[in-house]
Image (cartoon, rainbow, N blue to C red):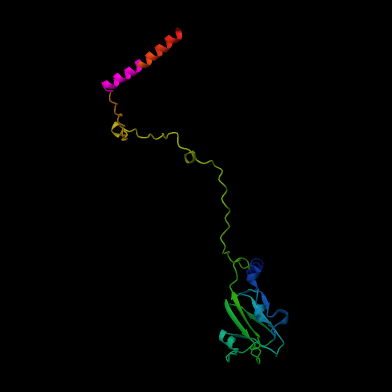
Amino acid sequence: MLNFSHLFLFLAFFLVPSSVVAGTDHIVGDDQGWDLGVDYSSWTIGKTFFVGDNLVFKYKKGVHNVLDVNVTAFAECAAPTNQSPLKTGNDIIPLRRPGTRWFICSIARHCQSGQKLVIFVDNPPSNGGQASPPPSSLPPASSPPPPSTSAPSPSASAPSHNQTTPHLPVPTPSESIPPSLSPVPSPSPTAPPPSGSASKAAISGHLGVLAVAVGALAGIMT
């Protein structure tokens, strides 16, 4: 008869994502392991630590050890008196909670020489074990508006046919232009008629001239 507990474990093994069943084992220092002369600050660059992962400290047994400490002991390289260090040479520390974790080697002055590690543990992402990329801070690029192809409105370029030409006001008789105020020249005074003695003298002169002309004509004809 089929055991339902075995069936449940079988289905859980195939249906539950591997990132949930087992975390990642991070070998501290990679090929260099847990030793002096390793820059562990550079080793953590580009690495992500999630709840459920494991830290694996590999070293030569009896030469080093591992202590999980707080920030004060980490800064002062002070080993807690109430805590026993790990010293198997292949120490596995599970990361069960999120937050910052500090580790040191308490043998001699190894911690003061740089044999210390600090990491930040994050909660596992909910999208299948891959962290979501940070949202972009740049606004989406907007395309420029297309050029307008519509003709300008007739009302904006020419007057409407319903508009009438404004009429200038016609002045009324009361608004007629006043006559010119330029002065009119007065008629020149008339010369007085010649006196009687002057008239007689003029007539006598004409008669004398006429008599001379008649006498000259008579002499030519004889």
Q: Position of residue 121 (x, y in %)?
A: 60, 76
Residue 189's place in the image compared with 71, above or below, is above
Asked where in the image residue 210 lies, by quadrant, the reply is top left
Residue 41 horizontal side relative to residue 203, left or right: right
Q: Position of residue 205 (x, y in %)?
A: 34, 18
Majority secondary structure of the magenta segment? helix
Q: Is residue 29 visible?
A: yes
Give me the residue at 59% from left, 80% from top.
101
From the image, which quarter does the N terminus lie in? bottom right
The furthest residue to the top: 222
Q: Position of residue 76 (x, y in %)?
A: 58, 88
Q: Position of residue 51 (x, y in %)?
A: 60, 75
What's drawn in magenta, residue-wise? 194-207
Q: Is residue 6 visible?
A: no
**Nearest the camera: 211 or 41?**
211
**Nearest the camera: 183 or 118?**
183
Give me the residue at 39% from left, 14% from top.
212
Give me the residue at 28% from left, 33% from top.
174
Residue 203 is inside the magenta segment: yes
Residue 25 horizontal side relative to residue 179, left or right: right
From the image, which quarter does the C terminus lie in? top left
